[in-house]
Image (cartoon, rainbow, N blue to C red):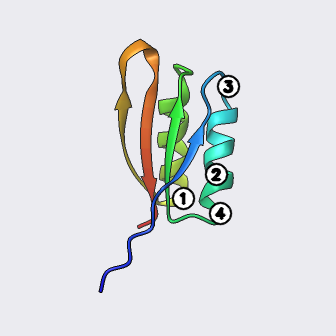
Amino acid sequence: MTSEVAAVVVDARGMRCPWPALRLARAMRDAREVLLIADDPQAGREVDALADEHGWLVEGDAASAGEGHWRVRRR
């Protein structure tokens, strides 16, 4: 029997860096997987740097209208 837990969603639209990355880091303290939504153009770079530092896996891309979605998971 597989137990799948839904990702925690962090909506950081309207926040400028470093706030999206800080919100992601805070959510990852307790969650195994987080979906980050952000519209700051620097968010992708910040998410990648934070994930590298902590060994997290990141899937994501910039979507329409400059909004990006990143799914971050623990290894």
| Mark 2 to mark 3 CA distance (whole Å) | 15 Å
- Are circles 4 and 2 on residues that touch, CB within 8 Å? yes
Lower sequence index among marks 4 and 3:
3
**Label 3 amino acid?**
Met
Q: Residues within 10 Å of mark 2 (few under 14, many from 20)?
A: some
Q: Residues within 10 Å of mark 3 (few under 14, many from 20)?
A: some
Q: Position of residue 59 (x, y in %)?
A: 35, 45
| Mark 4 to mark 2 CA distance (whole Å) | 7 Å
Q: Residues within 10 Å of mark 1 (few under 14, many from 20)?
A: few
Relative to 67, is 40 on the left or the right?
A: right
Q: Which residue is mark 4?
A: 29
Lower sequence index among marks 2 and 1:
2
Q: Which residue is mark 1?
A: 54
Q: Which residue is mark 3?
A: 15
Lower sequence index among marks 1 and 4:
4
Which is closer to the viewer, label 3 or label 1? 3
